[in-house]
Amino acid sequence: GILYLTPENCSFAKNGDFLSVTVTKDENKVYDKVSLHRLFPFDKRDEYISVLDTDSVEIGIISKISDLGEEAEKLIFDELKRKYYICKLKSVISIKDRFGFSYWKALSEDGEVSFTIRDAHNSIRTNSDGKILLSDIDNNRYELEPFDTLDAKTRKKIELYV
């Protein structure tokens, strides 16, 4: 069965650079390094989080992060923020296509970035609020504002891709 993780049966802690969890269901079982994965529906960013061990075996599910208390909530949100980091792009400087790859230079909130996209049809999507999501060949994620809100130069460069 599914174990729902609650303050009564688990505790989260930082273990160096990793998140750890102690499950007290039957006996204290410590998982020194766990990973978190958002479950469906994705728009509920603080609900239904799967906690996995190093072998990707599910330890349990967090129904709602805020139910675990402030300290655990901060640890979990920090880990999710790290895992699901998306580079926010402000504009596109250039795109060059070559042999089925497109080479992008863009200006992000943190400065200029360069990345490569293979198969633009499957690597560029528009989400429900109109934002353009891109995935590069290294599975890094990038986000552009909705097409109609971008500057004219950026729109012209990306119109073939969206």
Image (spheres, grey):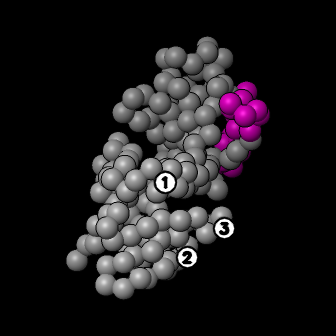
Q: Residues within 10 Å of mark 1 (few under 14, many from 20)?
A: few
Which tag, 1 or 3, sits closer to the chain's start?
A: 3
Q: Nearer the viewer, residue 24 or 125?
A: 24
Q: Nearer the viewer, residue 160 or 50?
A: 50
Outermost bottom residue: 27
Which of the 4 quarters of the picture holds residue 22? bottom left
User: What is the x, y in percent for residue 44?
Assistant: 33, 44
Cβ atoms at labels 2 and 3 below 8 Å apart: no
Image position of 66 with respect to 95: above or below: below
Instruction: Give the residue type that dot 1 points to.
Output: Glu
Of the 4 image quadrants, the one containing the N terminus is bottom left
Outermost right residue: 112
User: What is the x, y in percent for residue 154?
Assistant: 63, 22
Q: Which residue is mark 3?
A: 16
Q: What element does badge 1 sit on?
A: helix
Span shown in magenta: 93-113
Q: Which residue is mark 1?
A: 71
Instruction: Give the residue type that dot 3 points to.
Output: Gly
Q: How many marks?
A: 3
Image position of 4 with respect to 107: above or below: below
Q: Which residue is mark 2?
A: 32
